[in-house]
Image (cartoon, rainbow, N blue to C red):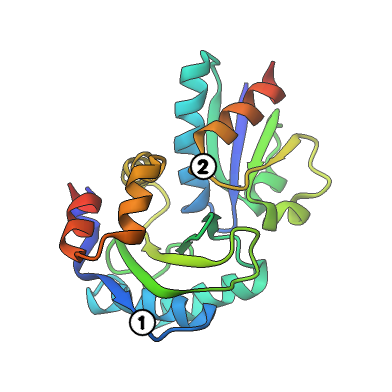
Amino acid sequence: MKIYAVCGAGIGTSVLLKSNADRVLASLGIEAEVQAVSVSDALASESLAQVVLITPELKDQIQGIRSEVIPIENIFNLEELTQKLSAALS
Amino acid sequence: MLAEAFGPNSIAHHSDITDWEGAISAAVALLEQDQKVTGGYLARVLEANQDQGPYFVVAPGIAIAHAAPEEDVQATGFALLRLQTPVVSGSHNDPVQLVFAFCAVDSTSHIALLGQFAELMSKPVNVNTLLNEPNLRIVRNLLTA
């Protein structure tokens, strides 16, 4: 399964999101590949991610993508990530 | 890794900044002082903020101002500006009190570094220290240990 962690540049916020999502998925025992990408990369990608993690400010920019879009309010809150990821993937 | 990214001038407390763009500018200026970026970087960070909104306010009270790797980044770097008075950015995570500035030379070499940073910031006790510890040497030790 593929998950995108998305931010404007694809190098900062998205990498932090990926790092914490990896940690949460490992503790949930879910196998998934999380990729940190920019908004434009996510939209241009041909292979579809099941889930897109994104900060709420950028949500509108990714409208139309055929993945489940999950806004993350606090990327350092592992509980929020755990809750949202397990709800989306279970 | 974080120890290398935080240069000698990279951690500061600021008492007279009252606006969001002023806070971004002062945080990126710390990267400039440590020769991590040249002047063009600040303009690109401010542009990203204007174009895309304050999306780099990633957690309550915490921003990580950054832009994509370009020629104006000289070395991967980190800086932290702590504000005496929190500022309003327009984010749902307002008001902002910890303004990190970050720059990367390319899109891959800093991934382990940010992993280390994410782990550190995911512990509320650490965020509490960053917000409240008066001694900046202790703040530096926490970030670069």
- Quick check: can you spot residue B109? no
Q: Residue at x 22, y 48 (%)?
A: B1
Q: Which residue is mark 2?
A: A17
> B45 above or below A14?
below
- Find the distance from the CA under tag 2 to the CA under tag 1: 31 Å
Give the image location of residue B111, x and y in percent: 37, 44
Give the image location of residue B27, x and y in percent: 37, 74
Examine the image and state in which quarter residue B26 appears.
bottom left
Q: Which residue is mark 1?
A: B15
Mark 2–mark 1 contact, CB under 8 Å?
A: no
Name the amino acid, label 2. Answer: Leu
User: What SS does tag 1 mark?
Assistant: loop
Most extreme residue toward the right, as rendered?
Answer: A64
User: What SS does tag 2 mark?
Assistant: helix
Count neighbours of disc 1 (C-alpha within 10 A) and say few if under 14, some if 14 to 19, many if 20 or more: few
Label 2 in the same subunit as label 1: no
Name the amino acid, label 1. Answer: Ser
